[in-house]
Amino acid sequence: AKNWLDTTLAKITAENPGQYVFLNTHPMLYDTTYGSTLLTGNHRWYTKDLTSIVEKYPQVVTFGGHTHFPINDERSIMQTKFTSLGCGSVTYLAIENGYSNVSGTVPGDASQSSAGLLLEVDKHGNIRITRMNFADGTTFKDAWEISAPQADGSHLTKYTKDRANSNKAPEMNGNVKISTTVVGGNTVGAVVFDAGTDDDFVHHY
């Protein structure tokens, strides 16, 4: 199967060097988009089998899922030597382990989410990706826009991991209240603070 993929991608990209090639996989390619490094127990939610093949073809756009991670997170698009997209899920979402109101990776209200991607390619080969929120008939944020493939790889510079280096950290206003109470002979503490503010959203505290 991997030999077939490599041969097919070589043929397609040679015939159409200025056009994107769409590759659909069930799992995400490892360490690309949001959720693509998830490991729970012995279960890998990603694949490492295809990266060495796909990275030879900068025109490739991969569409992966399996993790159901939310697409309103900007890490759901990532450009390395190719472009990767996390597709979310139309049925329910999942997030990382270790957060409250989560059983494993699935929040209690996960079924309230239904999302997907609307892809448009113009006559010049540019791609526009609209993140659809099927749950309420709206869209998430601004569309992602990718310029047509270029021989120098310049089309792969917009959505890289380097975006994190220029991202401003969330801000807290400093209003913190600490309280204690005794329950069954044990002292229990609570910390209450106002939600942080960010130009996007606060992922976690």
Image: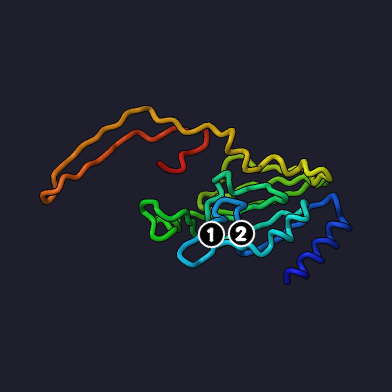
Residue at 61% across / 63% down in the picture?
47
- Residue 199 horizontal side relative to residue 124, left or right: left
Q: Residue 27 at x, y = what percent?
A: 60, 63
Q: Which of 56 and 105 is in front in this view?
A: 56
Q: Are marks 1 and 2 in contact (CB under 8 Å)?
A: yes
Q: Which amino acid does label 2 sit on?
A: Met
Q: Nearer the viewer, residue 88 or 182?
A: 182
Instruction: Describe the element under mark 1 as helix, strand or loop.
Output: loop
| Quadrant of the rendered image containing residue 167 | top right
Quadrant location of the C terminus in the rendered image: top left
Q: What residue type is labelled 1?
A: Thr
Identify the image's colour scheme: rainbow, by chain, secondary structure or one colour. rainbow
Vertical comparison of 182 with 166: above or below: below
Of the numbered discs in the image, which one, if any, rests on residue 173? none
Direction left: furthest residue: 185
Residue picked out by circle 1: 67
Vertical comparison of 199 with 153: above or below: above
Sequence-wise, which precedes: disc 1 or disc 2?
A: 2
Residue at 82% across / 46% down in the picture?
123
Residue at 39% across / 51% down in the picture?
99
Q: Residues within 10 Å of mark 2 (few under 14, many from 20)?
A: many
Residue picked out by circle 2: 28
